[in-house]
Image (cartoon, rainbow, N blue to C red):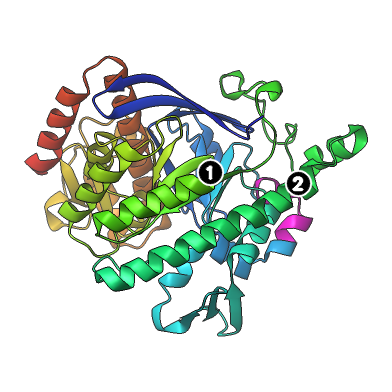
Amino acid sequence: MQPIKWEICAQDGEARCGLLKTRRGVIETPVFMPVGTLGTVKGTRFETLESAELDARIILGNTYHLWLRPGAETIRECGGLHRFIGWERALLTDSGGFQVWSLGALRKISEEGTEFRSHIDGSLRFLSPEVSMQVQAALGSDIVMAFDECAPGKAEHEVAHASMLLTSRWAERSRKSFDALQKEVWSLESGVESQRLKSELHLTPDSRLRTPDSRLQTPDSELSGAQALFGIVQGAAHLDLRRESLSRTVEIGFDGYAIGGLSVGEEKSVMYGVVEEIAPLMPEERPRYLMGVGTPEDLIECVARGVDMFDCVLPTRNGRTGQAFTSRGRLNVKNAQWARDMRPLDENCSCSVCRRHERAYLRHLYITGEMLASILLTHHNLAFFLDTMRRVRQAIRSGDFTRFRREFLEGVNSGIA
Ligand SMILES: [Zn+2]
Protein backbone atom coordinates (compact mmCIF):
# COMPACT_ATOMS: atom_id res chain seq x y z
CA MET A 1 0.00 0.00 0.00
CA GLN A 2 1.10 3.51 -0.74
CA PRO A 3 0.99 6.58 1.49
CA ILE A 4 -0.70 8.68 -1.22
CA LYS A 5 -2.52 7.98 -4.44
CA TRP A 6 -2.77 10.25 -7.41
CA GLU A 7 -4.87 9.75 -10.50
CA ILE A 8 -5.50 11.83 -13.60
CA CYS A 9 -9.14 12.84 -14.17
CA ALA A 10 -8.68 14.93 -17.29
CA GLN A 11 -5.92 16.19 -19.52
CA ASP A 12 -5.76 19.09 -21.96
CA GLY A 13 -2.42 19.30 -23.77
CA GLU A 14 0.21 18.94 -21.04
CA ALA A 15 -2.19 20.35 -18.41
CA ARG A 16 -3.47 17.70 -16.02
CA CYS A 17 -6.42 17.62 -13.66
CA GLY A 18 -6.15 15.00 -10.94
CA LEU A 19 -7.15 13.72 -7.52
CA LEU A 20 -4.48 13.37 -4.86
CA LYS A 21 -5.60 11.12 -2.03
CA THR A 22 -3.74 11.60 1.22
CA ARG A 23 -4.31 10.20 4.70
CA ARG A 24 -5.85 13.55 5.58
CA GLY A 25 -8.20 14.00 2.69
CA VAL A 26 -8.55 14.32 -1.03
CA ILE A 27 -6.93 17.21 -2.88
CA GLU A 28 -7.93 18.27 -6.37
CA THR A 29 -4.99 19.21 -8.59
CA PRO A 30 -3.66 21.51 -9.98
CA VAL A 31 -3.51 22.88 -6.46
CA PHE A 32 -2.13 26.01 -4.84
CA MET A 33 -0.83 25.43 -1.30
CA PRO A 34 -0.83 28.50 1.00
CA VAL A 35 2.41 28.83 2.96
CA GLY A 36 2.27 28.53 6.75
CA THR A 37 5.92 29.15 7.57
CA LEU A 38 5.75 29.15 11.37
CA GLY A 39 2.63 27.07 11.76
CA THR A 40 0.40 29.92 10.64
CA VAL A 41 -0.75 31.14 7.25
CA LYS A 42 -0.10 34.73 8.25
CA GLY A 43 -3.16 36.91 8.66
CA THR A 44 -5.73 34.09 8.30
CA ARG A 45 -7.61 31.81 10.67
CA PHE A 46 -7.78 28.10 9.94
CA GLU A 47 -11.60 28.26 9.87
CA THR A 48 -11.28 30.69 7.00
CA LEU A 49 -8.87 28.44 5.11
CA GLU A 50 -11.36 25.58 5.53
CA SER A 51 -14.41 27.63 4.60
CA ALA A 52 -16.18 26.96 1.30
CA GLU A 53 -14.90 30.32 0.07
CA LEU A 54 -11.20 29.39 0.29
CA ASP A 55 -11.37 25.61 0.81
CA ALA A 56 -7.59 25.15 1.02
CA ARG A 57 -7.05 21.39 1.17
CA ILE A 58 -3.34 21.46 1.95
CA ILE A 59 -0.94 24.00 3.43
CA LEU A 60 2.82 24.17 3.95
CA GLY A 61 4.93 24.23 7.07
CA ASN A 62 8.62 25.16 7.19
CA THR A 63 10.95 22.63 8.74
CA TYR A 64 13.78 25.12 9.30
CA HIS A 65 11.64 27.69 11.13
CA LEU A 66 9.66 25.18 13.21
CA TRP A 67 12.83 23.27 14.11
CA LEU A 68 14.37 26.45 15.55
CA ARG A 69 11.15 27.61 17.17
CA PRO A 70 9.34 26.07 19.02
CA GLY A 71 11.52 23.01 18.23
CA ALA A 72 10.74 19.56 16.88
CA GLU A 73 10.55 17.96 20.34
CA THR A 74 8.05 20.52 21.59
CA ILE A 75 5.81 19.89 18.57
CA ARG A 76 6.16 16.12 18.92
CA GLU A 77 5.16 16.31 22.57
CA CYS A 78 2.16 18.42 21.57
CA GLY A 79 1.00 15.61 19.28
CA GLY A 80 2.56 16.72 15.98
CA LEU A 81 2.10 19.79 13.85
CA HIS A 82 -1.56 19.18 12.94
CA ARG A 83 -2.57 18.91 16.57
CA PHE A 84 -0.30 21.75 17.66
CA ILE A 85 -1.79 24.24 15.21
CA GLY A 86 -5.35 22.85 15.07
CA TRP A 87 -5.45 21.87 11.38
CA GLU A 88 -6.84 18.50 10.33
CA ARG A 89 -6.31 18.74 6.61
CA ALA A 90 -3.14 17.81 4.77
CA LEU A 91 0.24 19.41 5.48
CA LEU A 92 3.41 19.41 3.40
CA THR A 93 6.71 20.33 5.00
CA ASP A 94 9.77 21.47 3.10
CA SER A 95 13.14 20.04 4.09
CA GLY A 96 14.77 23.20 5.38
CA GLY A 97 17.34 23.05 2.59
CA PHE A 98 16.09 26.14 0.83
CA GLN A 99 15.88 28.27 4.01
CA VAL A 100 19.39 27.34 5.01
CA TRP A 101 20.57 28.07 1.47
CA SER A 102 18.99 31.51 1.61
CA LEU A 103 21.01 32.32 4.76
CA GLY A 104 23.97 32.82 2.39
CA ALA A 105 27.15 33.74 4.22
CA LEU A 106 25.86 32.27 7.47
CA ARG A 107 26.18 28.68 6.22
CA LYS A 108 28.87 26.11 5.43
CA ILE A 109 28.09 23.13 3.21
CA SER A 110 29.90 19.80 3.43
CA GLU A 111 29.19 16.27 2.21
CA GLU A 112 27.66 15.54 5.59
CA GLY A 113 25.21 18.45 5.61
CA THR A 114 24.93 22.17 6.23
CA GLU A 115 26.30 24.00 9.23
CA PHE A 116 24.82 27.40 9.85
CA ARG A 117 24.12 30.05 12.42
CA SER A 118 20.53 30.41 13.54
CA HIS A 119 19.03 33.68 12.34
CA ILE A 120 17.37 33.99 15.75
CA ASP A 121 20.16 33.71 18.30
CA GLY A 122 23.30 33.10 16.24
CA SER A 123 23.79 29.61 17.71
CA LEU A 124 25.58 27.02 15.57
CA ARG A 125 23.21 24.42 14.08
CA PHE A 126 23.60 21.47 11.74
CA LEU A 127 21.06 20.25 9.23
CA SER A 128 21.53 17.06 7.19
CA PRO A 129 19.24 14.67 5.30
CA GLU A 130 18.94 12.54 8.46
CA VAL A 131 18.16 15.48 10.75
CA SER A 132 15.64 16.87 8.28
CA MET A 133 13.85 13.49 8.04
CA GLN A 134 13.78 13.21 11.84
CA VAL A 135 12.34 16.70 12.22
CA GLN A 136 9.71 16.12 9.52
CA ALA A 137 8.76 12.81 11.18
CA ALA A 138 8.31 14.64 14.48
CA LEU A 139 6.18 17.28 12.76
CA GLY A 140 4.07 14.46 11.28
CA SER A 141 3.41 16.18 7.96
CA ASP A 142 1.58 14.15 5.30
CA ILE A 143 4.10 14.97 2.58
CA VAL A 144 7.80 15.18 3.46
CA MET A 145 10.40 16.74 1.14
CA ALA A 146 13.87 15.26 0.59
CA PHE A 147 16.78 17.41 1.85
CA ASP A 148 18.36 19.18 -1.11
CA GLU A 149 20.98 21.76 -2.00
CA CYS A 150 19.92 24.70 -4.09
CA ALA A 151 22.38 26.30 -6.54
CA PRO A 152 21.96 29.98 -7.43
CA GLY A 153 19.71 30.53 -10.47
CA LYS A 154 22.67 31.79 -12.49
CA ALA A 155 25.17 29.15 -11.33
CA GLU A 156 27.83 28.09 -13.86
CA HIS A 157 27.63 24.55 -15.22
CA GLU A 158 30.42 23.22 -13.02
CA VAL A 159 29.02 24.67 -9.79
CA ALA A 160 25.48 23.57 -10.64
CA HIS A 161 26.74 20.09 -11.54
CA ALA A 162 28.51 19.56 -8.21
CA SER A 163 25.49 20.89 -6.36
CA MET A 164 23.10 18.62 -8.29
CA LEU A 165 25.25 15.55 -7.52
CA LEU A 166 25.29 16.46 -3.84
CA THR A 167 21.48 16.82 -3.94
CA SER A 168 21.24 13.36 -5.45
CA ARG A 169 23.45 11.81 -2.77
CA TRP A 170 21.40 13.63 -0.14
CA ALA A 171 18.21 12.32 -1.80
CA GLU A 172 19.45 8.76 -1.33
CA ARG A 173 20.27 9.44 2.31
CA SER A 174 16.87 11.12 2.78
CA ARG A 175 15.13 8.05 1.32
CA LYS A 176 17.07 5.66 3.54
CA SER A 177 16.58 7.62 6.71
CA PHE A 178 12.91 8.27 5.91
CA ASP A 179 12.24 4.56 5.28
CA ALA A 180 13.91 3.59 8.56
CA LEU A 181 11.81 6.13 10.46
CA GLN A 182 8.56 5.00 8.82
CA LYS A 183 9.40 1.41 9.57
CA GLU A 184 10.04 2.24 13.19
CA VAL A 185 6.61 3.83 13.46
CA TRP A 186 4.49 1.73 11.13
CA SER A 187 5.88 -1.77 11.62
CA LEU A 188 4.46 -1.77 15.13
CA GLU A 189 1.12 -2.19 13.35
CA SER A 190 -0.76 -4.41 15.67
CA GLY A 191 -3.91 -3.57 17.52
CA VAL A 192 -3.32 -1.36 20.49
CA GLU A 193 0.01 -0.03 19.32
CA SER A 194 -1.43 0.98 15.98
CA GLN A 195 -4.36 2.77 17.63
CA ARG A 196 -2.02 4.60 19.96
CA LEU A 197 0.13 5.75 17.06
CA LYS A 198 -2.89 6.78 15.08
CA SER A 199 -4.12 8.97 17.87
CA GLU A 200 -0.65 10.26 18.64
CA LEU A 201 -0.22 11.25 15.04
CA HIS A 202 -3.70 12.66 15.20
CA LEU A 203 -4.99 10.62 12.31
CA THR A 204 -8.34 10.10 13.93
CA PRO A 205 -10.73 13.05 13.67
CA ASP A 206 -10.62 15.32 16.69
CA SER A 207 -14.13 16.17 17.83
CA ARG A 208 -12.81 19.38 19.36
CA LEU A 209 -12.02 20.75 15.97
CA ARG A 210 -14.70 20.15 13.39
CA THR A 211 -17.08 17.72 11.78
CA PRO A 212 -15.16 15.67 9.22
CA ASP A 213 -16.10 16.69 5.70
CA SER A 214 -17.20 13.64 3.70
CA ARG A 215 -15.87 15.13 0.44
CA LEU A 216 -12.39 15.02 1.90
CA GLN A 217 -12.41 11.48 3.22
CA THR A 218 -10.18 8.79 1.80
CA PRO A 219 -11.08 5.20 2.66
CA ASP A 220 -8.45 3.95 5.13
CA SER A 221 -8.01 0.74 3.18
CA GLU A 222 -6.57 2.51 0.13
CA LEU A 223 -3.59 4.10 1.85
CA SER A 224 -0.82 2.84 4.09
CA GLY A 225 -1.22 5.62 6.66
CA ALA A 226 2.49 6.49 6.55
CA GLN A 227 4.04 9.79 5.48
CA ALA A 228 4.80 10.32 1.77
CA LEU A 229 8.23 11.43 0.52
CA PHE A 230 8.87 13.64 -2.52
CA GLY A 231 12.21 13.92 -4.34
CA ILE A 232 13.55 17.19 -5.74
CA VAL A 233 15.07 17.85 -9.17
CA GLN A 234 17.88 20.44 -9.18
CA GLY A 235 20.43 21.64 -11.78
CA ALA A 236 19.86 25.43 -11.98
CA ALA A 237 19.25 26.65 -15.55
CA HIS A 238 21.18 23.81 -17.25
CA LEU A 239 18.80 21.47 -19.01
CA ASP A 240 21.30 18.60 -19.27
CA LEU A 241 21.84 18.75 -15.50
CA ARG A 242 18.11 18.94 -14.90
CA ARG A 243 17.56 15.83 -17.01
CA GLU A 244 20.36 14.00 -15.21
CA SER A 245 18.98 15.08 -11.84
CA LEU A 246 15.52 13.84 -12.80
CA SER A 247 16.74 10.41 -13.84
CA ARG A 248 18.85 10.05 -10.68
CA THR A 249 15.87 11.08 -8.53
CA VAL A 250 13.44 8.74 -10.30
CA GLU A 251 15.93 5.91 -9.92
CA ILE A 252 15.87 6.32 -6.14
CA GLY A 253 12.06 6.35 -6.32
CA PHE A 254 9.66 8.74 -4.58
CA ASP A 255 5.92 9.18 -4.08
CA GLY A 256 6.00 12.46 -6.01
CA TYR A 257 8.57 14.67 -7.73
CA ALA A 258 9.36 18.35 -7.32
CA ILE A 259 11.27 20.89 -9.36
CA GLY A 260 13.35 22.98 -6.96
CA GLY A 261 15.76 25.87 -7.35
CA LEU A 262 13.62 28.01 -9.63
CA SER A 263 12.40 31.54 -9.00
CA VAL A 264 15.77 32.27 -7.32
CA GLY A 265 16.94 35.16 -9.47
CA GLU A 266 16.94 33.65 -12.97
CA GLU A 267 15.03 35.18 -15.89
CA LYS A 268 11.40 34.17 -16.18
CA SER A 269 12.02 32.68 -19.63
CA VAL A 270 14.67 30.41 -18.06
CA MET A 271 12.18 29.19 -15.47
CA TYR A 272 9.52 28.44 -18.09
CA GLY A 273 12.19 26.75 -20.25
CA VAL A 274 13.26 24.40 -17.44
CA VAL A 275 9.65 23.53 -16.55
CA GLU A 276 8.73 22.98 -20.20
CA GLU A 277 11.65 20.58 -20.64
CA ILE A 278 11.46 18.73 -17.33
CA ALA A 279 7.78 18.48 -16.28
CA PRO A 280 6.70 16.29 -19.24
CA LEU A 281 9.66 13.96 -18.55
CA MET A 282 8.62 13.47 -14.92
CA PRO A 283 6.77 10.20 -14.16
CA GLU A 284 3.28 10.61 -15.54
CA GLU A 285 1.55 8.73 -12.75
CA ARG A 286 3.04 10.83 -9.92
CA PRO A 287 2.20 14.37 -8.83
CA ARG A 288 4.59 17.09 -10.04
CA TYR A 289 5.33 19.96 -7.69
CA LEU A 290 6.99 23.25 -8.64
CA MET A 291 8.45 24.68 -5.44
CA GLY A 292 8.10 28.32 -4.43
CA VAL A 293 6.39 29.52 -7.63
CA GLY A 294 4.77 31.98 -8.20
CA THR A 295 2.50 34.72 -9.56
CA PRO A 296 -0.96 33.81 -10.91
CA GLU A 297 0.52 34.04 -14.45
CA ASP A 298 3.31 31.63 -13.46
CA LEU A 299 0.78 29.14 -12.10
CA ILE A 300 -1.20 29.14 -15.35
CA GLU A 301 1.93 28.95 -17.52
CA CYS A 302 3.36 26.05 -15.52
CA VAL A 303 0.05 24.14 -15.38
CA ALA A 304 0.16 24.42 -19.18
CA ARG A 305 3.60 22.75 -19.01
CA GLY A 306 2.37 19.84 -16.86
CA VAL A 307 2.78 20.91 -13.19
CA ASP A 308 0.19 19.81 -10.57
CA MET A 309 1.22 21.46 -7.29
CA PHE A 310 2.41 24.93 -6.30
CA ASP A 311 3.24 26.94 -3.20
CA CYS A 312 4.22 30.56 -2.81
CA VAL A 313 4.29 33.29 -0.17
CA LEU A 314 3.12 35.95 -2.65
CA PRO A 315 -0.61 36.13 -1.75
CA THR A 316 0.08 36.41 1.97
CA ARG A 317 3.32 38.42 1.93
CA ASN A 318 2.13 40.92 -0.68
CA GLY A 319 -1.19 41.20 1.12
CA ARG A 320 0.69 42.51 4.14
CA THR A 321 2.54 45.09 2.04
CA GLY A 322 -0.61 46.48 0.46
CA GLN A 323 -0.63 44.64 -2.84
CA ALA A 324 -3.70 42.89 -4.24
CA PHE A 325 -3.63 40.36 -7.10
CA THR A 326 -6.61 40.89 -9.39
CA SER A 327 -7.96 39.66 -12.70
CA ARG A 328 -6.52 42.87 -14.21
CA GLY A 329 -3.07 42.66 -12.65
CA ARG A 330 -1.72 43.98 -9.36
CA LEU A 331 -3.28 46.81 -7.42
CA ASN A 332 -1.30 48.83 -4.91
CA VAL A 333 -3.77 49.78 -2.25
CA LYS A 334 -1.67 52.67 -0.92
CA ASN A 335 -1.90 54.68 -4.13
CA ALA A 336 -3.62 58.07 -3.70
CA GLN A 337 -5.81 57.40 -6.74
CA TRP A 338 -7.97 55.02 -4.67
CA ALA A 339 -8.67 57.54 -1.86
CA ARG A 340 -12.33 57.94 -2.89
CA ASP A 341 -12.70 54.93 -5.15
CA MET A 342 -15.90 53.09 -4.26
CA ARG A 343 -15.15 49.97 -6.30
CA PRO A 344 -13.99 46.61 -4.89
CA LEU A 345 -10.36 45.51 -5.29
CA ASP A 346 -11.39 43.32 -8.21
CA GLU A 347 -14.73 43.80 -9.92
CA ASN A 348 -14.59 40.18 -11.12
CA CYS A 349 -13.91 38.73 -7.65
CA SER A 350 -16.74 37.37 -5.54
CA CYS A 351 -14.76 36.92 -2.31
CA SER A 352 -16.25 38.24 0.92
CA VAL A 353 -13.81 41.18 1.00
CA CYS A 354 -14.75 42.31 -2.51
CA ARG A 355 -18.45 41.89 -1.72
CA ARG A 356 -18.25 44.13 1.36
CA HIS A 357 -15.42 46.65 1.05
CA GLU A 358 -14.18 49.23 -1.42
CA ARG A 359 -10.70 50.40 -2.38
CA ALA A 360 -11.12 53.71 -0.52
CA TYR A 361 -11.66 51.98 2.82
CA LEU A 362 -8.92 49.41 2.29
CA ARG A 363 -6.49 52.22 1.45
CA HIS A 364 -7.52 54.08 4.60
CA LEU A 365 -6.89 50.98 6.73
CA TYR A 366 -3.49 50.46 5.13
CA ILE A 367 -2.37 54.09 5.43
CA THR A 368 -3.36 54.22 9.11
CA GLY A 369 -1.51 50.96 9.82
CA GLU A 370 -4.59 49.01 10.89
CA MET A 371 -4.02 45.25 11.09
CA LEU A 372 -7.34 44.68 9.34
CA ALA A 373 -5.73 45.95 6.12
CA SER A 374 -3.34 42.97 6.10
CA ILE A 375 -6.11 40.56 7.05
CA LEU A 376 -8.49 41.71 4.32
CA LEU A 377 -5.86 41.93 1.58
CA THR A 378 -4.48 38.51 2.50
CA HIS A 379 -7.98 37.07 2.36
CA HIS A 380 -8.70 38.51 -1.06
CA ASN A 381 -5.30 37.36 -2.41
CA LEU A 382 -5.74 33.80 -1.14
CA ALA A 383 -9.29 33.73 -2.53
CA PHE A 384 -7.96 34.95 -5.88
CA PHE A 385 -5.19 32.31 -6.06
CA LEU A 386 -7.42 29.45 -4.91
CA ASP A 387 -10.32 30.47 -7.15
CA THR A 388 -7.97 30.80 -10.12
CA MET A 389 -6.90 27.18 -9.56
CA ARG A 390 -10.55 26.09 -9.34
CA ARG A 391 -11.17 27.73 -12.70
CA VAL A 392 -8.02 26.12 -14.11
CA ARG A 393 -9.28 22.67 -13.10
CA GLN A 394 -12.68 23.36 -14.58
CA ALA A 395 -11.13 24.57 -17.84
CA ILE A 396 -8.97 21.43 -18.11
CA ARG A 397 -11.97 19.20 -17.40
CA SER A 398 -14.01 20.88 -20.12
CA GLY A 399 -11.14 20.83 -22.62
CA ASP A 400 -11.13 24.62 -22.64
CA PHE A 401 -7.78 25.33 -21.01
CA THR A 402 -6.15 27.02 -24.03
CA ARG A 403 -8.87 29.64 -24.23
CA PHE A 404 -8.91 30.09 -20.45
CA ARG A 405 -5.13 30.60 -20.42
CA ARG A 406 -5.25 33.21 -23.21
CA GLU A 407 -8.10 35.17 -21.65
CA PHE A 408 -6.60 35.04 -18.16
CA LEU A 409 -3.25 36.37 -19.37
CA GLU A 410 -4.93 39.09 -21.45
CA GLY A 411 -6.82 40.11 -18.32
CA VAL A 412 -3.87 40.35 -15.92
CA ASN A 413 -1.84 42.21 -18.55
CA SER A 414 -4.58 44.71 -19.32
CA GLY A 415 -3.80 46.80 -16.26
CA ILE A 416 -5.77 48.16 -13.33
CA ALA A 417 -7.96 51.17 -13.93
ZN1 LIG B 1 -11.77 39.58 -3.70
Quadrant assignment, res 9: top left
Ligand 1 picture quarter = top left
Question: Which residues fall within the magenta stretch?
Answer: 74-84
Foreground pick, 274 / 363: 274
Quadrant assignment, res 381: top left
Residue at the right extreme, as displayed: 192
Q: Residue 254 carries which label?
A: 1
Q: Position of residue 284 (x, y in %)?
A: 40, 31
Q: Which mark is residue 183?
A: 2
x 89%, y 39%: residue: 193
Gap in Å between the C-alphas at discs 1 and 2? 16 Å
| Left or right of 76 on screen, residue 365 | left
Quadrant assignment, res 343: top left
For mark 1, does the 10 Å Cα neighbourhood hold few (<14), some (14 to 19), or many (20 or more) residues? some
| Magenta-span inclusion, residue 322 | no
Placement of the C terminus among the 4 image quadrants: top left
Q: Where is residue 166 in the image (x, y as percent from the top left)?
A: 46, 67
Q: Where is residue 94 in the image (x, y as percent from the top left)?
A: 51, 55
x 30%, y 45%: residue: 278
x 47%, y 54%: residue: 42
Residue 44 appears in view: no
Q: Which mark is residue 390?
A: none
Residue 36 appears in view: yes
What amino acid is at disc 1? Phe
